[in-house]
Amino acid sequence: MKTRTALRRVLSDDRGFESSGQSGHESAPSNDGALLDAYSQAVSAAAEKVSPAVVYIEVKHHRGDKGQEYPRGSGSGFVFTPDGFILTNSHVVANSSRVAVTLLDGRTLEASLIGEDPDSDLAVLRIGALNLKAAELGDSKSIRVGQVAIAIGSPFGFQYTVTAGVVSALGRSLRSASGRLIDNVIQTDAALNPGNSGGPLVNSRGQVIGVNTAVILPAQGVCFAIAIDTAKFIAGRLIRDGRIVRAYIGMAGTNISLPRRLVRFHRLPAETAVAVASVEPDSPAHRAGLQTNDILVGYGSHTVNAIDALLRILSDEPIGVPSTVTVIRGTEKLTLQIVPTSARPRDAK
């Protein structure tokens, strides 16, 4: 009897222990479930908030002597103003003869190209519709590595597909089709596929933090989006001017390593620089006296340690304002004055 009584006490105690929530084995699944539910709800709520602003873009172009239109491809975009302005990628709509936009409610409308910027791979379209649901634009500076990132688009034509992951890294650089570097790019492992290009990358609050633009194949989980602060600036300029004007100096160069004795002798801040490979006739570089085989080490107050660094500088350099370039010619250090323009001479005609 004593043994049975003791056994009943132990079982009773165990049941009390479990019901009180102190058993790690019993409470863990409940907590995990709550966490998963919260994550799912965040993704679902963000997708529901943004999806009405996401559009499917179909592009056609003329081909052949008869000027017949043929499908060229498709992509994604999103409405960012109630009166029909849409953000997408430049490579989605480049060389298009006609662009059609399909909204979530099933309407398909012709879109006009307001402007595109291949250097940042961004473009602005507009459709003739009012009172549209516009996506809320977030703030790039508030993004943190590890936060939830949700991509919405139409991969392979499957419209309004949602994928989720995290922000993998910030401050990446990505080379555009034009050869310029796009700075401040977001890396994410939210799955992107052909057709996602131009769609929004959003946070858990449904705010757009980036414009999906590229994947690295055959890598998996390495995808990129242009930061929304960059997109805001470019979109504003495209709406105002129809294009983006960047400083042009008219030289081609290659990255080189400098001899240590040259670095020490001239007290240069970097051991790499840009060797001038060619100078275009009648360009700002030509008028400044820049010559082939000069070594460009500085532009204004900036150090030039690579071609990419020079491209970044020219993206922010005011046009028509004199600046200085510092070069090594032979063993001599020279400072030349240069006045960047907005276009190549042949483009200005």
Image (cartoon, rainbow, N blue to C red):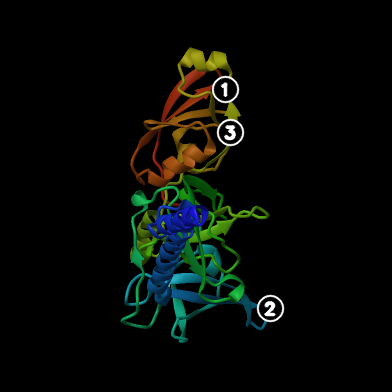
Q: Which residue does the image show at 36% across and 35% down from the upper left?
A: 323
Judged left or right of residue 139, residue 28 is right
Q: Which residue does the image show at 43% across and 43% down from the upper left?
A: 314
Q: How much space separates mark 3 and mark 1, taking CA atoms?
A: 10 Å
Amino acid beneath label 1 = Leu
Amino acid beneath label 2 = Gly
For label 1, the SS is loop
Judged left or right of residue 237, residue 275 is right
Foreground pick, 274 / 197:
197
Q: Which residue does the image show at 42% across and 50% down from the upper left?
A: 246
Mark linked to residue 100: none
Q: How much space separates mark 2 and mark 3, taking CA atoms?
A: 42 Å
| Displayed quadrant of residue 159 | bottom right
Q: Nearer the viewer, mark 2 or mark 1?
A: 1
Q: Which residue is mark 1?
A: 258
Q: Nearer the viewer, mark 2 or mark 3?
A: 3
The percent position of residue 65, horizontal first and vertical second, equals: 68, 80
Q: Which residue is mark 3?
A: 255
Q: How many neighbours does mark 1 have within 10 angstroms: few (below 14), some (14-19), or many (20 or more)?
A: some
